[in-house]
Amino acid sequence: MTDSANPTGASPTGPDAGATFYHGTRADLAAGDLLAAGWTSNYATEKPLSWIYFSAALESAVWGCELAAGAGRERIYIVEPTGDWFDDPNLTDKKFPGNPTRSYRSRSPLRIVGEVESWTPHPPDVLAQMKAHLAQLQAGGKAEIID
C-alpha cells in the first residue's frame, strides 16, 4: 500500500509487530482518521510532543483515555501505525523494565481502524490516586517526558 502516510509502501516495523494496537483519548474521531504527533501530553507537558503514543495493551489505553484532557467522552481507538515505531522510553526500562505495558511511540501517524466499544474503567478511587500522583510529580518538577 502506498499513500501519503506511508509513501514508500514498505511495511512499518516495530516491537509487537502484528499485535492489535490501542490509543486512549477524548477526541471524537472516526475510522480512517489519522492521529499524529504535535499535540500536548495528557500527563505532564504543555508543549507539543514530536511523537504519537500507543500500546498493544488495552489497560494502557484505558489509562490514556481516563487521564486525557478535555471534557469529551473517553474513547479507545484501535490503531495501525503507518510508519516505524519504537519502545516508549518514558516507560520501557525506566519505570517498568522489559516494557510490560507494551507502550510504543512513532513519528508517523496512527490510522484509526476501529473503536473499543466496551471496556472496564478504573474504580474512582484508583483513578483519583493516579491523578494525585501525577499532580505531585508535576508540582515537584518530576513529570518529565522524554521527547
Image (tube, rainbow, N blue to C red):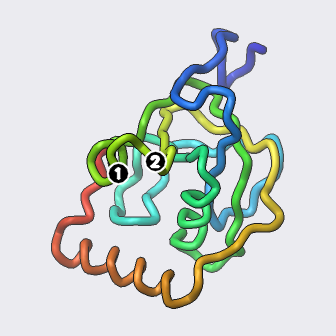
Judged left or right of residue 137, residue 29 is right
Q: Position of residue 114 (x, y in %)?
A: 82, 48
Quadrant of the frame with the N terminus: top right
Q: Residue at x 66, y 43 (%)?
A: 21
Specify few, some or many for label 1: CA neighbours under 10 Å numbering under 14, 14-19, or 20 or more: few
Residue that carries the numbered disc 1 in the rendered image: 96
Query: For residue 72, which quarter of the picture?
Result: bottom right
Label 2 – label 1 distance at C-alpha: 7 Å
Dot 2: within a 10 Å radius of its alpha carbon, few (fewer than 14), some, or many (20 or more) residues? few
Q: Residue at x 54, y 66 (%)?
A: 63
Q: Answer yes or no: do the residues labelled 2 and 1 have beta carbons within 8 Å?
A: yes
Mark 2 — residue?
Answer: 100
Q: Position of residue 123 (x, y in %)?
A: 59, 85
Image position of 38 with respect to 69: above or below: above
Q: Label 2: state its secondary structure.
A: loop
* Total numbered labels: 2
Disc number placed over residue 29 in the picture, else none: none
The image quarter containing residue 111 is: top right
